[in-house]
């Protein structure tokens, strides 16, 4: 089986090497670019790139413009890296179709975990949009959930919430991240609305509801 190709774009060579070394250990093939212009050249020369890790602050062409150029032609998963911790930047990233947003400094192990989660998610979408975890079967295309073979009636948001949890199995998710991805970034309500939906979802899942773990002071994690 061919290795999945990941394009790492950052003007700092040390950062590229750090990320590259961790990805290679996980058996990925890594392509590198030092700015947005070089990144686009490499991207359009390599149709089989599975994911792009993209820094925001770069010479010649920044990460935002590079992301726009890629998104005009491709839905390839994109992880944005930034030295800033600005909510407006994060919202702009989601508006451009960014899949993940990680602030520097970050743990390379966490970055690799996010890469693997996104690639699992995209491959799950390719497999007729059906996910099966711990006795729960979720069909995104048909909008159906079965537990141990029995149909479960969920509201639209409960379905989207369960789908997001299953796609990110084993990853700690903050309320803000859940809000951005399930309710979308144009929702300006209280993040506590998530707690209400989680409570209802757990109740409907019965014993399976225990798979949704509470991380106090942060959010939730779906774990079998």
Image: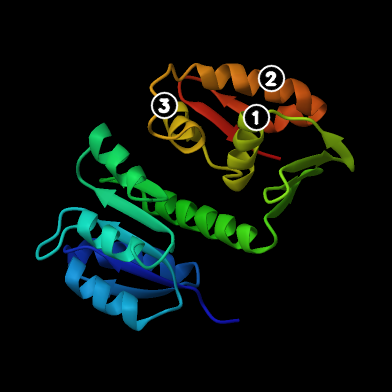
x and y percentages locating residue 180 in the rendered image: 43, 34
Tell me the number on the disc at residue 134: none
- From the image, which quarter does the N terminus lie in? bottom right
Quick check: marks 3 and 2 in contact, CB under 8 Å? Answer: no
Colour convention: rainbow
Q: Which residue is mark 1?
A: 158
Q: Is residue 2 left or right of residue 21?
A: right
Quick check: marks 3 and 1 in contact, CB under 8 Å? Answer: no
User: Mark 2 Cα within 10 Å, few/some/many (few <14, many 20+)?
Assistant: some
Point 31% across, 38% down: residue: 91
Point 34% across, 44% down: residue: 95
x and y percentages locating residue 152 in the rendered image: 81, 33
Q: Quadrant of residue 35?
A: bottom left
User: Mark 3 Cα within 10 Å, few/some/many (few <14, many 20+)?
Assistant: few
Looking at marks 3 and 2 on the same chain, the residue that comes earlier in the sequence is marked by 3
- From the image, which quarter does the C terminus lie in? top right
- Name above or below for residue 37 compared with residue 156: below
Looking at the picture, tell me which residue is in the foreground, 198 or 143. 143
Disc 3 to disc 2, how far (Cα)? 20 Å
User: Mark 1 Cα within 10 Å, few/some/many (few <14, many 20+)?
Assistant: some
Tell me the number on the disc at residue 200: 2
Point 38% across, 22% down: residue: 188
Q: Is residue 5 left or right of residue 123?
A: left
| SS of the residue under disc 2 | helix
Q: Which residue is mark 3?
A: 187
Looking at marks 3 and 1 on the same chain, the residue that comes earlier in the sequence is marked by 1
| SS of the residue under disc 3 | loop
Q: Quadrant of residue 163?
A: top right
């Amino acid at each position: 089986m061919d290795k999945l190709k990941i394009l790492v774009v950052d003007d700092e060579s040390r950062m590229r090497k750090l990320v590259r070394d961790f990805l290679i250990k996980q058996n990925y093939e890594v392509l590198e670019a030092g700015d947005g212009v070089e990144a686009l050249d490499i991207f359009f020369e390599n149709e089989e790139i599975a994911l792009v890790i993209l820094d925001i602050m770069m010479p010649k062409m920044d990460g935002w413009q590079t992301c726009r150029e890629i998104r005009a032609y491709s839905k390839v998963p994109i992880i944005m890296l930034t030295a800033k911790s600005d909510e407006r930047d994060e919202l702009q990233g989601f508006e451009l179709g960014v899949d993940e947003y990680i602030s520097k400094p970050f743990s390379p192990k966490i970055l690799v975990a996010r890469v693997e989660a996104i690639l699992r998610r995209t491959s799950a979408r390719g497999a007729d949009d059906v996910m099966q975890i711990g006795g729960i079967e979720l069909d995104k295309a048909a909008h159906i959930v079965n537990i141990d073979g029995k149909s479960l009636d969920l509201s639209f948001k409960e379905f989207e919430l369960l789908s997001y949890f299953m796609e990110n199995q084993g990853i700690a998710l903050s309320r803000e991240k859940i809000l951005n991805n399930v309710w979308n970034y144009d929702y300006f309500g209280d993040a506590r609305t998530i707690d209400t939906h989680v409570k209802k979802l757990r109740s409907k899942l019965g014993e399976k509801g225990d798979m949704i773990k509470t991380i106090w002071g942060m959010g939730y994690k779906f774990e079998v």
